[in-house]
Amino acid sequence: MSLQVIMFMILGVGAIVTALGTITRRNPVASAMNLVAHFFMLSGLYLTLQAQFVAVVQVLVYAGAIMVLVVFVIMLLNVGKEEAHHESFTIRKVLGLVFAGAIVVQMLAIYLGSSPSAMSQLSSKSLTLGATESIGTVLFNQYLFPFEVISLLLLSALIGAVILAKRKVD
Amino acid sequence: MDSIAQTIDAVLYWLAQPNILNILVLSVAKGGLVLNIILVIAAFLVWLERKVSAWMQYRDGPNRVGPFGLLQPLADVLKLYTKEDISPKNADKFFHRLAPVISIAIAISILCVVIPATYIYVGPEKLKFYFSVAPNVNVGMLVILALTSIGVFGVTLAGWSSNNKYSLMGGLRSSAQMISYELSMGLALIGVLMIAGSLDMNNIITSQANGKWNIFFQPLGFIIFLVASFAETNRAPFDLPEAEPELVGGYHTEYSGMKFGLFYLAEYANMATSSAVLTTLFLGGYDAPFAKELLGLQDGTLLMVLVQFGTFFAKVFALLFFFIWVRWTLPRFRYDQLMNLGWKVMLPLSLANILVTGGVMLLLKQFGIL
Amino acid sequence: MNDFILAAPLVAMSFLSVICIVVDALSPKPGKIPFMFAGFSLLGALLLTIPTFWYHGTAFQNMITVGGYSAFFDVLFLIGGLLTLFAGRPYIAREHFDHDEFYSLIMFSVAGMMVIGHSNNLLISFIGIEIMSVSFYVLSGYLRKSIRSIESALKYFLLGSFATGFLVFGIALLYGATGTLEFPAMHAAVVADKLNFPNLLTVGIALVLIGLSFKAAAFPFHQWAPDVYEGAPTVVTAFMSTAGKAASLSALIPVIAAVVPQTNWKVGMVLAVISAATMLVGNISAVVQSNIKRMLAYSSVAHAGYLMMGFVANNPNGMTGVLFYSAAYLFMQIGAFVIVSLIEKENDGNLQLADYAGLSKRNPVLAALMALFMFSLAGIPPMAGFFGKYYLFIAAVEAGYTWLTIVAVISSMISVYFYIGLVVTMYFKDSTDTTEQDSKPGLAGVTLAISCAFVIILGLFPQLIEKLAHSFFM
């Protein structure tokens, strides 16, 4: 077993445990912190795939920016512990299970349906894909237009948020 | 003497072998070393801060424990260790304990990618023995930003888990402040990254070799990054999260004993880290302009490495002195002033800095200078 | 650099909409300067579209198409933006919400729509749809003091985000199936049957269809439309129920052309059923409405059904019909909504159908214009609406969907009931309240004049646009 496989197993188990922690903790802050830990695990998994840039950005954006805001909001609203729900067998749970099952089946189908050779080809290609240089090159050549246009999207969302949340009307 | 040198060479040679066991041993050893160095520096800084402030206020400062009071931090730590560890009745015990750990852990782990000196050649094959924990991370700068952005959790969680409104206010203030200044911080260093053309710390340093330090080409970026560093470390004049007159003690109101000690230490560790990052980005890192020419030193020799270490730490301590100097000179900002400065001054300025840097670089390329 | 010239209208619109914010921030008094800036920007972009009509190709590494139907939609969206701008200025002034962000948001949404129209890549379509939707979320909640406006924004936002999820998932599956997001490459993969997982393609198309049907308010994802259209500021409703709908459906043009080659047209049946159900549900629900905005909202649902007939046919005539009907529908629906916004009083007053009784006496010009738009919406012959429907119906029959055409004719007949019902109310019922003064149209008069002119011109000389549109799909 190579170091990569060992790391993958540790991080994979960690990711699952923290993901479970996220949805099972009653305390919203504990839940959020589990999610932060989960993002760290995911970032480690990206590292085992040689995608350094994606790994770091995962921490920077999700754990460092988005989750800070989430925790911030939880604290501002002073959300207490979620009260124990006593719903035993509702349509929501059934639907949730069905959809989760569907995704599992889908993943398995893709995994079993693809040949190992295709996978190894992909992984040799992805060795360079995750590096900062290749991302930058692709981003500013092939994907220049969507990259620039997305700024319009973000700007309009920003202005919208300001308009809707401004305290004084004028 | 020769035999000692040979033994060291042999040990380093063994450690530099690229296999899993050696990498693990080496990483743990280097990590432990960094941990100890940073703790010693932090302790020294506590003493320095008190001495400098005393000097500025025409006092003597600590002078009883040890020569010039140098052992004062040791006494402080002993006091903190022996104090009773109180946590509030309704506090969330787990997070209350976790918060200071996060704070100090982040401050120290950032140092893993900082490069205080390059490498020496060891063994017959001239293997390179690197002196930083993670020497060849090709996204080093992003790692620093990412870990910095995690640091906010320490203060925020401390404020929330204490179950005290002053603490909570402090925690919220700090998270708002840190998020606001992280933006300008990240944007300010883009100019540096453009010049270096890389996120790798090695390349950033080598791009500034021989006195071409970024502080000369990116003065605005340097100032913005410096100010943002003050805000990120929650130091005066941006120490609103713990503003004593308004918030009692801010996020660490409810902390006592060594848990408080950890926060205290984290503040100084953060200062050291920020100074190290600033040195790397803007002051040329370990670059000593005269070393190669005047002293005739070669890369990879022990002497060269010693010079590099010396240069690096000299720069770091100069910045640390500046941190302390600012704290005891400037009054604290008001909260709205802080936010206005962050969003309305620093952010536009850092964006303008990127624009100007890009424009100038493009022009220079057009004329074939770059 | 060449790319920038080719995509000049789109690039100009994007830059100007960003600059518009700066103008807002710097202009001392709200109103005049940003309005003028937005107006001239839209006009300028409109002028820039003219040369692109003679060019067919792609720009920015095959990311966007230039010329052809993209140019047509550019013109359509820009004119829609201009009409909204003119009608919007007096409207938001009357509602005491004269903030300048209104203009930049309108410009953002126009830019988003243009991005959709130019898309040559699913990624671009998605970004365009999101720019447009986000602007609409904000615009529909623009009257922050009105609880209905806030409700509409919240509903639109929550459901819209949900639909976006479907869209993204669908796009991801299409990528998984074909290994590309570019429409020509996707088309090549589908034709050559080089699919990684053929079933993914079906699921992917289904999810994309769900997402786009939501954005276009087609059955069964139309329930949000009446609430949102009712609560949103009337001028905004006019804009998003016309240009927004046309833009959402224009996203379907390349998708359908790429992923469903003529030889293997299974999705046609699904689209046909959606189209038929949309028409029937929209028109039947509109019959029982007493609030005019709700009535027009349901009628706009029905019109999405008519437009989808063109995609069902999936032949040059069908696409021509889509283009022509989008144009005709834009003018008649904006006209109708702008009249509603003029009759409307502050705080959602004067919005019942009963309030229109005797309008012909109080304000004969408005009543006549409203009647004109109603006739056109119902598809009465000399108006633009008639020819739009005519082209669509012909195309559907050509493609062998005679039953769909029959359904469409029946639902058109149902719609005549409430469209003409409004005209009857205006002309043949007496108002209980004769003292009230109707507001002067002001700048909105420009919108009405332009809409009215186009409804008549398109009705009298339909070949003008029909020829042009047909040439795009040959």
Image (cartoon, rainbow, N blue to C red):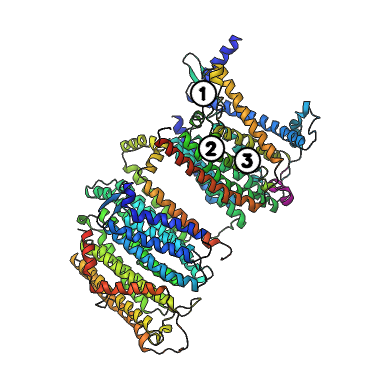
Q: Which residue is mark 2?
A: B218
**Numbered mark located on residue B187 in the image:** none
Observer-nearest of B39 and B61: B61
Q: Which dot, 3 or 2, sits closer to the camera? A: 2
Image x and y of residue C203, in percent: 32, 54
Image x and y of residue A39, in percent: 50, 44
Tag 2: amino acid: Gln
Q: Residue at x 46, y 60 (%)?
A: A92
Image x and y of residue C451, in percent: 33, 72
Q: Helix, strand, or loop for circle 2?
A: loop
Observer-nearest of C28 and B101: C28
Q: Residue furthest right?
A: B64
Task: Give the mark, 3 or 2, whose residue is nearer the N terminus.
Answer: 3
Q: Which residues are magenta?
A: B243-256
Q: Is residue C310 above or below residue C122?
A: below
Tag 1: amino acid: Asn
Observer-nearest of B86 and C216: C216
Q: Helix, strand, or loop for circle 3?
A: helix
Q: Residue furthest top?
A: B2
The answer to whether residue B252 is left or right of residue C93 is right
Question: The disc numbered 1 marks a residue on which chain?
Answer: B
**Numbered mark located on residue B103 in the image:** 3
Residue C166 shows in the view: no
Q: Which dot, 2 or 1, sits closer to the camera? A: 2
